[in-house]
Amino acid sequence: MEERTRAYLRGRFGDVYRRAEIDLPPRADDREWGYIPWTAGPDTTMVRHKSTLDLGSMASFLERKCPRHVYFSAGTYDAPGAATMDEKHWQGSDLVFDLDADHLPRVTLGEDSYAEMLSKCKDALLRLLDFLERDFGFEELTVTFSGGRGYHVHVRDAGVYELGSEERREIVDYVRGNDLALETLVEAEPVGGRGLENPTEKRMLPADGGWGRRVTTRLEAFADDLIERGEDDAVATLTEFDGVGERSARAIYNVVADNTTAVKRGNVDVHPAFLTVARRYIDETVAAEQAPIDEPVTTDTNRLIRLPGSLHGGSGLEVQRLDRAALDDFDPLVDAVPETFVGHDIAVELPAEHTVELRGESLTVGPGVSTVPEYAGVFMMARGTAEKATE
């Protein structure tokens, strides 16, 4: 990034911050703060181990420094401004989740547009919130658009505050579906009359909640589809499953047709051949419904996370706190564009043609010098695809 570009962005970030009203996180004085300034050179320089006492009021700090990125810690400390983690004396931490579009299994880098990546990331966010709200029952949730490639969720329920890294890793394993298998998911349920000397058991998916609910929902749809197809079509479909021949396929079809209610309740012991189907749908459910969060962010009790209301120095978009009820309608490439950058045109220079999707429009510019809406120019300069041209 050229000095002219860096100076322009720093100045315009300052203009945004002079008008901004930043709401600090709870216990802000007990948190570590950090930021990245607009320094020259290819590498960024993180300034950290700061407290609110070091920075002063957030409004005056942002106006004075106009930082490229601003962060606060998930953890709270007795001495947040101490130079080492041991000297800080950890008290506890928010439970933080990070979804980054670059790391999603459904995103194809180089093929998906920025808008498509963010759309897929919001789908992953909704799956994560389903886990946090329905499976864990968390209530104190703050959801933010990161300003860049994804979303953050901060959980501040009292029960998570003192969890260590290992306990947090167990939560990660759960929402990602790590090592989920039939044997770890099913529950044994006795069958037959009471008082039997050697009672038998059947294995059931716990269909009332958790991963069991997700798998049985898919098995219900599978059973309905299989019956609707009829035997011959269903057998042809089932033989496409690994390890299922025609004889097993007919057995599975007949079992599902004769025991539809049991299958939909999650009984995986209706027939030995049905175990192949159950295992397949467990794997399929994990692949489709896991929340592919960034594990190190959640397990690190000292993690720094972006400040809502600040600007992302790699996009010029706002790190925006989101209302849970309005999440479905949120469009980051429209709603996170700062109003300060709207209504002005600037000159930028690009080495090659580039397309930007912002505020509901697609703009293709370059190569060479072009005049573009300022919000598009800031976005391209922040992402390194354009430089500020002389006016």
Image (spheres, rainbow, N blue to C red):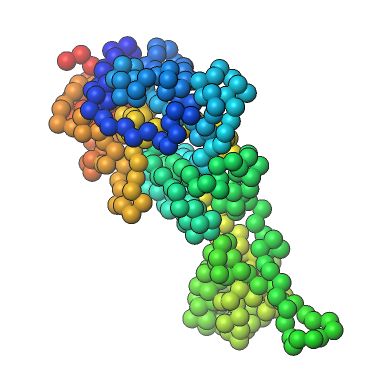
- Answer left or right for 38 relative to 194: left
| Residue at (55, 65) in percent of width and height | 209
Give how far across and how far down residue 260 sits, in percent: 57, 82
From this view, report whether residue 159 is shown above or below residue 83. Answer: below
From this view, report whether residue 264 is shown above or below residue 30. Answer: below
- Answer left or right for 299 relative to 311: right
* Residue furthest out toward the right: 197
Give how far across and how far down residue 208 sits, in percent: 55, 69
| Residue at (42, 12) in percent of width and height | 41
In-front residue for pair 287/61:
61
In-front residue for pair 345/326:
326
- Answer left or right for 368 relative to 91: left
Give how far across and how far down residue 197 sits, in percent: 85, 84
In-front residue for pair 154/27:
27
- Residue 257 image-quadrant placement: bottom right
Can residue 343 be seen from the camera position used here?
A: yes
Can residue 250 be seen from the camera position used here?
A: no
In-front residue for pair 169/52:
52
| Residue at (55, 31) in percent of width and height | 302
